[in-house]
Amino acid sequence: MRFIPLGKGHLRACSAFVWAFSIAAALTACGGGGGDADPAKLPGGVSSGPALSAMAQLGQKVFNDPSLSASGRQSCASCHDAATAHAQPNALAAQLGGSMLDQQGSRLSPSIRYLASNKAFSFTADGTPNGGFFWDGRASSLQEQAGQPFLNPVEMANGSKDEVIRRLAAASYAEEFRKLFGDNIMGDAEAAFQRLTLALQQYQLEDSAFRPFSSKYDAFLLGKIPRLNDQEIRGLALYNNPVKGRCFACHPSARGSDGRLPLFTDFTYDSLGVPRNGELRQNDDPNFYDLGLCGRDDLKDRTGLCGKFKVPSLRNVALRHAFFHNGKFKTLKDVVTFYVQRDTNPEKWYPQNADGTYDKFNDLPSAYRGNVNVLEGPYNRQPGQEPALSDAEVDDVIAFLQTLTDGYQP
């Protein structure tokens, strides 16, 4: 598609509309990248699917049960609140857990919506890391992801699977668990824990609340509304413009060739040079660095992956109170501005060195700062150059991102 230059005044607005509308018209033909999902082909449908199976109903009870934690006050829903699209409900850099709810976690709690079509971690033919669950992709499935918080000492803080199952045996729905999995299931902690996490996975797969596809943008793509408003259209144009926002490169906005709705993530990984966050207690140690992919034991020798974290979906991004793996930014305005001014205005984001330069990418050891993405727009600019987006254009992109919030009523 040929880029349409933007002029001034009404010509600028008109060109933006043509650009965005051309993209919108192509959405039914363009591939949306990895991870597209067709709600009609996933359990639960678009909005109100069939009644949940007995296993999924059990998983729903487990998901909302704080008694399965050592503190008795933390459930899966505590960090993945439906009101914030199953992301964390506050602006903390990381949630508090542990037996006394006084232990800070190490990373932001991401949304767990729209993960049904995600795959286990792997490398594509060209060596690109893809898939996996958590910020570093270490879990291979929804089931494995669901199990880890139960045993994490700074989350639900159970000392063993046996301890989890003892708590489960005392839950109000324990008899339902036995009825579904056998009278003697509680006697085998390993088997019971496996069924517990399987039920959590089944709940997320069946309940359409985890993938409602009910945003304004979905309504637009599905023809339920004729168009977005002028600012949203301008934002869509900038989002998809390869020399402006270029957001589509990692967060595809197009429908799949088979009509599947976009998930706004390609499930890959990137190193963005997000500034260090002093709110995280682990960062009190100046020698500590969260290395992302190469922080995993199985990838510790892959230094080219250091600093790379999962590309999250942008669906419901406007509902979030903190952003990036370390929760550094608290507003969507700051996030989009950082993307386009990280390199043109480093003084806004990084501390100053004694020699007057700025300590860019200061949340990574100097040896790995070369992994940060500096080649693709909008990162390929230098101090003194104009950012890829003006302040008004940043607001336009945010207006478009707000159309990705579920629960829109035409």
Image (cartoon, rainbow, N blue to C red):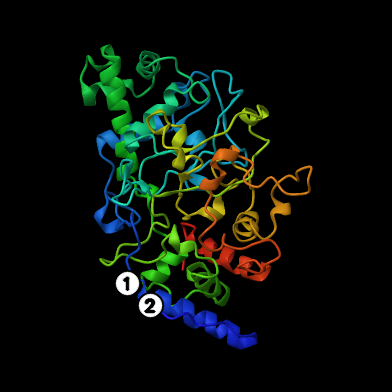
Name the quadrant of the N terminus.
bottom left
Dot label at residue 25:
2
Residue depicted at x 33% and y 41%: 121
Q: Is residue 45 above or below residue 388?
A: above
Q: Are marks 1 and 2 in contact (CB under 8 Å)?
A: yes
Of 247 and 40, which appears nearest the observer? 247
Task: Please tell me whether mark 2 sits on a helix, a strand or a loop.
Answer: helix
Q: Is residue 320 above or below residue 109?
A: below
Amino acid type, callout 1: Thr
Q: Where residue 58 sits: x, y (%)?
A: 32, 31
Q: CA distance from mark 1 to mark 2?
A: 7 Å
Q: Is residue 98 left or right of residue 65?
A: right
Farthest-out residue, bottom: 11
Of 400 and 257, which appears nearest the observer? 257
Question: From this viewpoint, is residue 56 visible?
Answer: yes
Q: In the figure, residue 27 lies in which quadrant?
A: bottom left
Q: Where residue 371 sits: x, y (%)?
A: 51, 46
Amino acid type, callout 2: Ala
Question: From this viewpoint, is residue 61 visible?
Answer: no
Residue depicted at x 49% and y 54%: 316
Q: Is residue 173 left or right of residue 107?
A: left
Farthest-out residue, left: 182
Task: Please tell me whether mark 1 sits on a helix, a strand or a loop.
Answer: loop
Q: In the figure, residue 36 lies in which quadrant?
A: bottom left
Dot label at residue 28:
1
Q: Where residue 237 sits: x, y (%)?
A: 50, 73
Q: Is residue 151 left or right of residue 169?
A: right
